[in-house]
Image: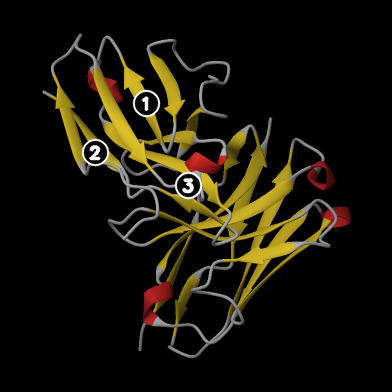
Amino acid sequence: EVQLVESGGGLVQPGGSLRLSCAASGFTLSNYWMYWVRQAPGKGLVWVSRISTDGSSTNYADSVKGRFTIARDNAKNTLYLQMNSLRAEDTAVYYCVRADKGLDYWGQGTLVTVSS
Amino acid sequence: QSVLTQPPSVSGAPGQRVTISCTGSSSNIGAGHDVHWYQQLPGTAPKVLIYSNTNRPSGVPDRFSGSKSGTSASLAITGLQAEDEADYFCQSYDRSLSASVFGGGTKLTVL
């Protein structure tokens, strides 16, 4: 069974940092592009970043470019999102997502709250 | 303001048919990029409903169908059921932004 389990969310002050992790199981992580998608409370889905199968190619939404870094460790079956210089508008549930036929598997999400 | 435009809400009675539109531009849907549709039930993560414009993953009822034409795509739901009440999002790729993009979402209410 495919599972994606995010961790690392929490309350952080503006300007602070957090690192999200996503533990993948039930499939071979190295075969798939992976995405981070976020959803602010009561709002829609917003693409954040994506990474190629071997990590050599990464893309970011303009709103997070230069502040967030996506990475993966295929040997550890884990996807990461390093988030620096956090702002109030980064407050959201962050989903780790596998890309195959569309975005076909989603984690349960981890809540990041940026507030003083 | 989302790159892909969806109606904020649609509604229908049980058994009826509803459609949800997703309007893009020549840099995304009109450029030939695939459109995917997701259903998000209250308090849960999204789930893929239609991928690559018209394809249903296994387990998705054939009451759900997708289409694409020009710079727009549509999701149709026939034989509406109470459990279809959810938020629906379309997604594609925008070559001008070099980014994956979502529609703003449509809330379906089953009357």
Instruction: Give the chain letter at badge 2.
Output: B
> In the rendered structure, which amino acid carries the disc numbered 1?
Leu
Colour theme: secondary structure
Residue situated furthest right in the rendering: A75
Residue A42 point in image, percent of width and height: 27, 56
Q: Residue B75 got which mark? A: 1
> In the rendered structure, which amino acid carries the disc numbered 2?
Lys
Q: Answer with mark 1 or mark 3, whichever residue precedes in sequence.
A: 3
Crowding near the residue tagged with mark 3, few <14, some 14–19, many ≥20 C-alpha atoms within 10 Å: some
Q: Which residue is mark 3?
A: B26
Q: Secondary structure at mark 2?
A: strand
The residues bearing labels 1 and 3 have C-alpha atoms spaced at a distance of 20 Å
Residue B88 point in image, percent of width and height: 35, 36
Q: Which residue is mark 2?
A: B107
Residue A68 point in image, percent of width and height: 61, 75
Cβ atoms under marks 1 and 2 closer than 8 Å: no
The residues bearing labels 1 and 2 have C-alpha atoms spaced at a distance of 13 Å
In the picture, which quadrant includes the C terminus of chain A? bottom left
The residues bearing labels 2 and 3 have C-alpha atoms spaced at a distance of 26 Å
Mark 1 vs mark 2: tell me if same chain.
yes
Crowding near the residue tagged with mark 1, few <14, some 14–19, many ≥20 C-alpha atoms within 10 Å: many
Q: Secondary structure at mark 3?
A: loop
Using residue A113 as the reference point, say whether residue A80 is left or right of it: right
Residue shown at 57%/83% (left/top)?
Answer: A17
Residue shown at 19%/38% (left/top)?
Answer: B9
Residue B55 point in image, percent of width and height: 55, 20
Q: Is residue A43 above or below residue B15?
A: below
Q: Answer with mark 2 or mark 3, whichever residue precedes in sequence.
A: 3
Cβ atoms under marks 2 and 3 closer than 8 Å: no
